[in-house]
Image: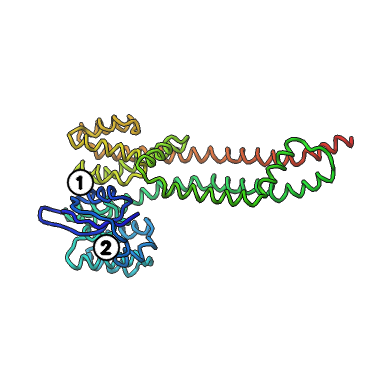
């Protein structure tokens, strides 16, 4: 992630100079466009020199998404209660326990005090306030309903966080079982098996094949280079995923792979479709035009394959093609979704249709997660039982042989 200085046209006679963070120059131009500006000049610069304290030094401390959601909800409540925006920001900065967020709110306070709007002040912090967030704030300012806009934002963010939390919670138990099971197997092979091996050696008899295989695995795991190699492999894979998958083609391949995963692929797809529908619905209900709403919605998605399909379809919609017909061109979007969107466009009830789609996909995601969890638990128990049972039998086979010989 780099920092880019840019000059852009905000209006016919309004030129702004600011900074933005992005992985590439092309992404920076796209983000500037999402803000509604026309980039005139852009160049990469040093983040430490281009940003003030809260955006540079303290920036690395970060702030959680949940804190931003709480901040948004509290600001909405204060404004709705009739508290002026400067006083509301001062109160929130004073009570904030996060140093970075406190610094950001204080700087936003200073910008507004100089005469800038809240949306303009937020534009310097795209790392924590997305273009979607800023677009909704700007719409609320223009319509005089900033408190309602902030409330809608906080509700939207809460729903998105809840979906992600449900998926993570559902996966925690099976993952914990897998870690404990693997740890148990490794412990038995590295510490229990060597002690039994000494006993088997003293007996001086030919060992059964399963026991020999188990001894070979145990010997392999007790080699120090194996674990060093395993750690290095994990680090290498992590670095490749984090820094290597940066080209558009690589991101598309990884995204396509995620969507094709058994069980999980369907959950990933429905989560993304629910997010897109919810975002588009929120923007349209806030009074943002359809084209701008689609453009702002695209960056909220995490799957590059779906994002690329929407980018390609955007130009068709811009030329006058309907959204539903455009979605039908791309196999990644279910026919059910495309047909329902077409019906919503024809009847003038697109917002209601998007809300229904969101509720449908969120409900199906919850059901899929529950089914997956209910299936994974017994499957994990069965697999670990078979593995551990096989190890125990392989350990006891020589003992059984001794009994047979003695009898």
Q: Is residue 108 visible?
A: yes
Q: Reply above or below: 45 against 398.
A: below
| Mark 1 secondary-structure assignment | loop
Q: Residue at x 31, y 63 (%)?
A: 55
Q: How many marks?
A: 2
Residue 370: x and y in percent read 48, 40
Q: Which residue is mark 1?
A: 288
Is 107 on the left or on the right of 269, as rendered?
left
User: Mark 1 or mark 2, which is nearer to you?
Assistant: 1
Q: CA distance from mark 1 to mark 2?
A: 25 Å
Closest to the observer, 302 or 366? 302
At 29% from the left and 68% from the top, the residue drawn is 91
Residue sticking out furthest to the left: 13
Residue shown at 28%/33% (left/top)?
A: 327
Question: Viewer-proximal residue, 117 or 189?
Answer: 189
Left or right: 361 in relation to 112: right
Measuring from the top left, give residue 246's x and y in whole percent. Answer: 37, 46
Q: Are marks 1 and 2 in contact (CB under 8 Å)?
A: no
Residue 193 pos. (x, y %): 73, 47
- Assign the N terminus to one quadrant of the image: bottom left
Q: Position of residue 136 (x, y in %)?
A: 24, 51
Checking the image for residue 78, the label placed there is 2
Asked if residue 359 can be seen in this view, the reply is: no
Is residue 26 rendered to the left or right of residue 13? right
Specify which label sits upstream in the sequence, 1 or 2.
2
Vertical placement of residue 268 versus 4, above or below: above
Q: Residue furthest bottom?
A: 94
Q: Where is residue 367, by image quadrant?
A: top left
């Amino acid at each position: 992630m780099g920092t880019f200085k840019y000059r852009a046209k905000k209006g016919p006679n309004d030129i702004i100079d600011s900074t933005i963070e992005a992985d590439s120059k092309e992404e920076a131009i796209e983000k500037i466009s999402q803000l509604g500006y026309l980039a005139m000049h852009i160049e990469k610069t040093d983040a430490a020199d281009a940003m003030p304290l809260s955006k540079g030094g303290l920036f690395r401390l970060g702030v959680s998404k949940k804190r931003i959601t709480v901040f948004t909800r509290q600001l909405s409540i204060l404004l709705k209660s009739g508290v002026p925006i400067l006083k509301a920001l001062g109160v929130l900065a004073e009570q904030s326990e996060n140093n970075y967020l406190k610094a950001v709110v204080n700087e936003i306070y200073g910008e507004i005090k100089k005469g800038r709007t809240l949306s303009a002040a937020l534009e310097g912090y795209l790392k924590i306030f997305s273009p979607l967030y800023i677009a909704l704030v700007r719409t609320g300012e223009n319509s005089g309903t900033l408190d309602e806009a902030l409330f809608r934002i906080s509700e939207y963010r809460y729903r998105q966080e809840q979906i992600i939390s449900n998926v993570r919670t559902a996966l925690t138990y099976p993952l914990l079982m897998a870690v404990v099971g693997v740890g148990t197997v490794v412990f038995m092979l590295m510490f229990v098996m060597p002690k039994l091996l000494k006993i088997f050696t003293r007996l001086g008899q030919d060992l059964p094949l399963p026991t020999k295989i188990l001894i070979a695995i145990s010997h392999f795991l007790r080699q120090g280079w194996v674990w060093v190699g395993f750690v290095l492999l994990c680090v290498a894979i992590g670095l490749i995923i984090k820094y290597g998958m940066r080209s558009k083609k690589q991101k598309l391949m990884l995204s396509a792979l995620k969507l094709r995963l058994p069980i999980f692929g369907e959950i990933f797809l429905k989560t993304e479709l629910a997010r897109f529908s919810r975002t588009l619905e929120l923007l349209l209900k806030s009074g943002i035009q359809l084209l701008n709403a689609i453009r702002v919605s695209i960056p909220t998605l995490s799957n590059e394959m779906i994002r690329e399909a929407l980018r390609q379809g955007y130009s068709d919609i811009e030329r006058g093609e309907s959204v539903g017909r455009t979605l039908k061109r791309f196999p990644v979007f279910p026919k059910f979704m495309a047909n329902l969107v077409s019906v919503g466009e024809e009847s003038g009830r697109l917002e209601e249709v998007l809300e229904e789609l969101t509720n449908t996909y969120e409900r199906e995601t919850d059901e899929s997660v529950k089914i997956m969890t209910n299936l994974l638990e017994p499957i994990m128990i069965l697999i670990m039982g078979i593995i551990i049972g096989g190890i125990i039998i392989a350990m006891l086979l020589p003992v059984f042989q001794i009994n047979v010989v003695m009898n």
